């Protein structure tokens, strides 16, 4: 599974994590985050609609956290790419 995730993440410019899935799939998301960090990919966290809290361990390493809003998501991705 790790090899497959690495192949998916490698060509990406930014890794987007839906934080609402963290409670159900923490191991999978941790693997994605580890791979993204090793490959030097920025992480953008998306909060579930209507919620403010995201896992603190993810928030500390993310390049940005946004709500479930198309404009905010696109802007944060663009900002993450400019920060590289």
Image (spheres, helix red, strand yellow):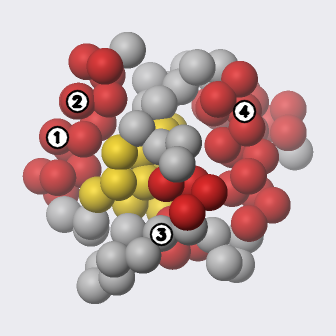
Measuring from the top left, give residue 35's x and y in whole percent.
72, 32
Q: Which mark is residue 54?
A: 3
Which label's residue is closer to the chain start, 4 or 1? 4
Measuring from the top left, give residue 30's x and y in whole percent.
73, 52
**Cα distance, mark 4 to mark 3?**
20 Å
- Quadrant, the C terminus: top left
The mark lying in front, picked from 3 and 1, is 3
Residue tagged 4: 35
Measuring from the top left, give residue 7's x and y in whole percent.
72, 27
Which label's residue is closer to the chain start, 4 or 2? 4
Task: State left or right for residue 71 relative to residue 42.
Answer: left
Is label 3 in a helix, a strand or a loop?
loop
Which label's residue is closer to the chain start, 4 or 3? 4
Measuring from the top left, give residue 81's x and y in whole percent.
31, 22
The mark lying in front, picked from 2 and 3, is 3
Q: Which mark is residue 78?
A: 2
Please report contact status of discs 2 and 3: CB closer than 8 Å, yes or no.
no
* Residue beneath the point at 35% across and 45% down: 64
């Amino acid at each position: 599974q790790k090899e497959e995730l690495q192949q998916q993440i490698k060509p990406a410019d930014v890794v987007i994590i839906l934080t609402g899935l963290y409670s159900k799939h923490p191991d999978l998301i941790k693997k994605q985050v580890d791979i993204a960090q090793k490959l030097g990919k920025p992480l953008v966290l998306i909060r579930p609609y209507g919620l403010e809290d995201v896992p603190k361990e993810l928030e500390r390493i993310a390049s940005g956290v946004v709500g479930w809003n198309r404009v905010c998501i696109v802007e944060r991705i663009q900002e993450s790419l400019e920060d590289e």
